[in-house]
Image (cartoon, coloured by chain):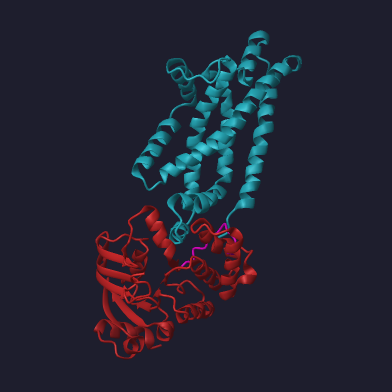
Chain colours: A cyan, B red
Amino acid sequence: MDDLIEYAPDLAAGFLVNVKIALVCAVISLVLGTVLVSFRVSPTPVLRAAGTVYVNVVRNTPLTLVLAFSALGLSDTIGLTFSDEPSTNGFWLVVLGLSAYTATFVGEALRSGINTVPLGQAEAARAIGLTFLQSLRLIILPQAFRAVVAPLGSVMIAMIKNTTVALAAGYLADSAFVMKDTFDDTGVSIPIFIGLVLAFMAVTLPVGFFTGWLSRRLAVVR
Amino acid sequence: MTEAGGSSPLVKLEAVNKHFGTLHVLRDIELSVARGEVVVVIGPSGGGKSTLCRVINRLETIDSGGITFDGQALPAEGKALAKLRSEVGMVFQSFNLFSHKTILENVTLGPIKVRGIARQQAEQRGLELLERVGIASQAAKYPAQLSGGQQQRVAIARALAMDPKMILFDEPTSALDPEMVQEVLDVMVGLASDGMTMLVVTHEMGFARRAADRVVFMADGQIVEESAPEEFFTQPKSDRARDFLSKILTH
């Protein structure tokens, strides 16, 4: 218990890094996932193929490898840098990798949502003269989103926990890193371990409850 | 001003063929609809009536032949196709109102997003149209809160809101409870007498008699017979039509 109290400030700072990554990733992966699903249902075969290949490659690659590629491949080899400050650069590389990875799950959740929207909705949209993008944006996606709020909540919870893999993208003092660092000094401390678990649950449980509540509230009545 | 309101047909189908897999659903269809004309398409199920309706605004593509609307060949895709569809109203068997939008939003969406009309103006016109079909008091509700007959009348108002040159009706009363059929047919009869060009796929013989200028009888993907309603119902020319009418008119 003393360990937890002693190292609490470091751990809290580390945890804050996880929260920051999660917030930015949530926004980017939702936007990117929506773009991806638009590709996958597009009438243009090239876009459909591009969406399918992207989803199947990235979704089936272990996250550790995606992040390692982000750091070693994109940053070190190709020279993509966001900042000269290593921790800032590391932060954005993690955000990039994790968002690219999470977007595939967002896209697939949305695609299953699109499948719940009756075909007649799209036909009616086309029949009044809406273009493909307009029908998608105004009629199909709003209904698809409402159908998959709860599954998207699960995707977001997984993403929040996945922020602890940030270490794979290079130097970034997130909570998992701080914990491991601390254990090197103190030996394994159960209180620290439990403290971090509780911290994550304090964030992820409300996300689950909120999206569950929201999905009932937003459900489209047919 | 070469042919506006002139005698050229609004819609013309020439030698149209369409297959669903091995099923030849439209066979050498020749049909034209004049401006202001009300054409009722009847015939046994699976005879290609709905498909005929749906190829006119290209919800279904055709395999061969040609379709012109207002003198122009139907565009294949993109903005031109969207523009054509905005000029051809469509009323579906299953209403297909946008479930996540209110009744008023259903009626104003097209004018605002497709025509670029200001929201306030679109809402005013939308309410007028809802008034015309007798649903103005329900404007703030969602489709699922309305009866089938009310939903179908909203669907008609939604089509009218685009000021279409023509409205296609694909079995508009087939999904309705019997007591709601009349309220929808009344609206349609009103439209017909106001001079709207209409192509109506239906099983409502009463409507055909009251409102149609012409009856087209379709079976097995072909137009078997075309004639004035009274003539069709009293003196059908083909055996196929006689057989069909004997089955539906005896009770």
Give x and y (percent) for residue B213. 37, 83
Residue at point 61%, 61% (across, down): B120
Compared with residue B182, is residue A27 higher up or lower down, i.e. above or below?
A: above
User: Does A139 sit left or right of B232 as displayed?
Assistant: right
Compared with residue A24, is residue B150 higher up or lower down, i.e. above or below?
A: below
Give x and y (percent) for residue A221. 58, 58
- Give the magenta range: B94-104
* Magenta span main SS: loop
**Looking at the image, can residue B98 be seen?**
no
Residue that sits furthest to the top in the current view: A185
Compared with residue B82, is residue B163 higher up or lower down, i.e. above or below?
A: below
Q: Depth check: A145 or A96 in front?
A: A96
Give x and y (percent) for residue B5. 38, 75
**Quadrant location, the N terminus of chain B:** bottom left
**Quadrant location, the C terminus of chain B:** bottom left
In magenta stretch: residue A31: no
Q: Depth check: B20 or B216 in front?
A: B216
Q: Depth check: A56 or A84 in front?
A: A84
Residue at point 47%, 66% (across, down): B94
How many marks do you count on the picture? 0
Which quarter of the figure has residue A210?
top right
Residue at point 61%, 48% (across, down): A215
**Looking at the image, can residue B7 be seen?**
yes
Residue that sits furthest to the bottom in the current view: B234
Residue that sits furthest to the front in the current view: B1
In magenta stretch: residue B97: yes
Give x and y (percent) for residue B65. 24, 64
